[in-house]
Image (spheres, helix red, strand yellow):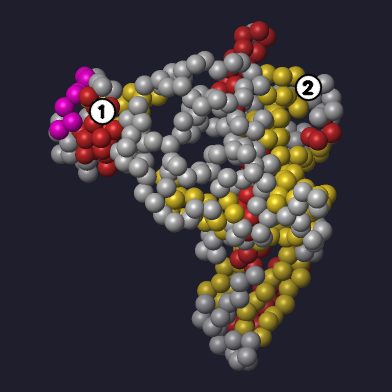
Amino acid sequence: MLDVDEFNLKTLVSQKMQTIGEAWPEYNGGLTYNDVVSASHSGLTLIQFYSSKYTSSAPLQGWLQRIHNTQIMIDGGTVIDPDTILRVGSELVYHRLPWKEPEAPYLLEVLYEDDDMIALNKPSGLQVLPGGLFQQRTVLSQLQWHANKTSKQRLSRESHPVPVHRLGRGTSGILLCAKTKHAKTCLAAYFADGTSLVHGKRLVMKYLFLYIFALLAINVRERKITKIYRALVKGIINRNEIEINQPIGTMRYPGVSRGLYVALPSGKPALSKVGVVERDVQNDQTLVKVEIQSGRPHQIRIHLSYIGHPLLGDPLYVAGGLPQCSGMEFVDEGYAEDGGYQRPLKPVPGDIGYHLHAHEVILSHPTTNECRGCGIDVMLMAVVFVDWVVVEWSVGLVVMTARFLEKLGIEVAFGIRCFNSPRKFTLSIVERLHL
């Protein structure tokens, strides 16, 4: 175990690395889905229940096929009549038949491992967690197989390693995994804190007008993790450094049931810091490093395409942070052999080919540097009224809070911004934290 509180995983790559991984079986073990009929679903037919509740799994004809294939049971008995009436409290079980998952690599390099955590070098093409067609061919499966094998060899208590963040299927590089509940809690909090800091800064920059109840959130935290990626993008980026502060939201898109993440003004805050590493003028491409301050899905792909430099080989996102095929088209109602939908003809987020690598992670160790009291959350409730007394009281609150923070060694600047009308004020709290 490392005896330092903060360490850089990139420096460990040069050491001799262990490789783990077992070849995938040809077919997975299938899946089982359990439901209990609620009062709101009582009286529906079996086909009505599944075709309405699980519309993203299969079209109507696909569910009929599954019922006729004796894949659904009610209260322990197989049912083949799709018009069977459901009663409240009945237990439904759908057995998804085993299938051959798409090809995926299975070998993982171990960059670092101790009793609390393990850092892996994930290859491109391997999904982190189960989803869609990939239910077995995932990093999680290999981790579980490795843990079971190791615990039997060492006759020790079985651990349950799990990834604490995600990398896109096409993204390669460092993936952090926790081996204990404590490590999982701490590492997950590190990633969540980065996103909350971005959210807090966005709230702080909002101006408040007359009679508006303002909630100014200042997240004063010690940065516990830094993630730096390398990406190869189209075109030549002229500026050496770029800060991209573009919200990310979802839009309807064929083949993506929960919506496709895109650059959207009404989305959630997201911040990426981009620095040019090398410009390849001859091939019209740029190698960049990207530090993400938040962890929105596909954030780097979206942000770089938003500024007009999509990742080289990205089949989905184009300039503007939108999909290259943005026109809504309904999914083909035809169904695959297992009753599910045919694979969409348009590109989807899980398609690979882009050049993105999780290059460096710097973090505080979850055990040697206990995350007890990771930070201080100060919530300022400021009501801006016409009454000058109330405004002066609000300013006084800010001054007292600033002095309190300064005693803790945290520097905070504050000020008042006056608009055209002398009776309209807003309190502008600006963080200047030394992270």
Q: x and y percent of residue 268 in the render?
A: 56, 58
User: Number of numbered discs present?
Assistant: 2
Which kind of residue does numbered mark 1 sit on? Gln
Secondary structure at numbered mark 2: loop
Residue identified by numbered label 1: 65
Residue 178 seen from this side: yes
Q: Residue at x 85, y 28 (%)?
A: 14
Question: What's the CA distance linking mark 2 and mark 1?
Answer: 48 Å
Percent coordinates x, y for residue 87 in the rendering: 17, 33
What SS does tag 1 mark?
helix
Residue 158 shows up from this direction = no
Q: Is residue 89 left or right of residue 245?
A: left
Magenta-drawn segment: 77-83
Q: Residue 380's spot in the image, x, y percent?
A: 62, 67
Q: Which quadrant, please, contains the N terminus?
A: top right
Contact flag, marks 2 and 1 (Cβ < 8 Å): no
Q: Quadrant of residue 176?
A: top right
- Going by the image, does 420 lie left or right of 101? right
Q: In the image as oriented, which residue stretches furthest toward the front?
A: 282
The residue under the point 72% across, 24% down is 109
Q: Three-letter amino acid code at disc 2?
A: Met
Q: Residue at x 64, y 44 (%)?
A: 313
| Residue depicted at 55% across the width and 39% down the height | 351
Label 2: how many residues lie within 10 Å, few (<14), some (14-19) or many (20+)?
Answer: some
Residue designated by label 2: 17
Q: Position of residue 58 (x, y in %)?
A: 33, 36
